[in-house]
Amino acid sequence: MTRSPRASGFNGRSTPVASSRLIDAVAASLALGVLSLCVVVGMTVLSTNVGMALPLIG
């Protein structure tokens, strides 16, 4: 089996595939998504704790 003369993997030259503004926009949207997920999980945990503290009616 012979090797290809071209560089493969991470050893070759890097070519930019997206603009820095696009990368910044994707990073900002991911950060916003993570923040909103943390807020939703936090509210769920707090509401579960409050619900457990209430007496059962019935």
Image (cartoon, helix red, strand yellow):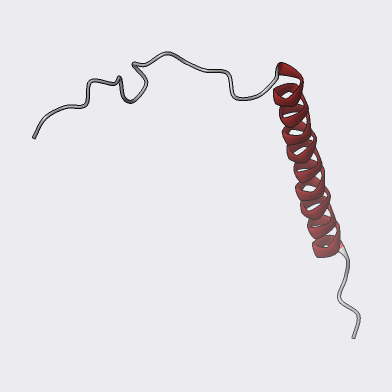
Up the image or down, 47 lies above or below 24; here it is: below
- In the image, 5 versus 43, the foreground residue is 5
38 relative position to 1: left or right: right
Can you say whether 48 is above or below 57 in the image? above
Residue 19 lies, in percent from the top left, at 70, 20
Q: Quadrant of the N terminus?
A: top left
Q: Is residue 52 above or below residue 37?
A: below
Residue found 11% across the figure and 30% down from its top: 2
Q: How many marks?
A: 0
**The residue positioned farthest toward the top in the image shown:** 13
In the rendering, at what x and y percent does residue 33 appear?
Answer: 77, 40
Q: Residue 3's spot in the image, x, y percent?
A: 16, 27
Locate residue 20 relative to residue 15 in the image: left or right.
right
**36 vs 18, nearest the viewer:** 18
| Identity of the residue furthest to the bottom in this view | 58
Q: Quadrant of residue 48?
A: bottom right
Q: Position of residue 49 (x, y in %)?
A: 79, 56
In this view of the protein, which residue sits in the foreground, 23 or 16?
A: 16
Given residues 51 and 9, the one toward you in this image is 9
Q: Quadrant of residue 56?
A: bottom right
Quadrant into which the C terminus falls: bottom right
Q: Which residue in the rendered view is the most extreme toward the front?
A: 5
Look at 30% across and 19% down and name the residue there: 7
Write the residue at 84% across / 56% down. 47
Residue furthest left as drawn: 1
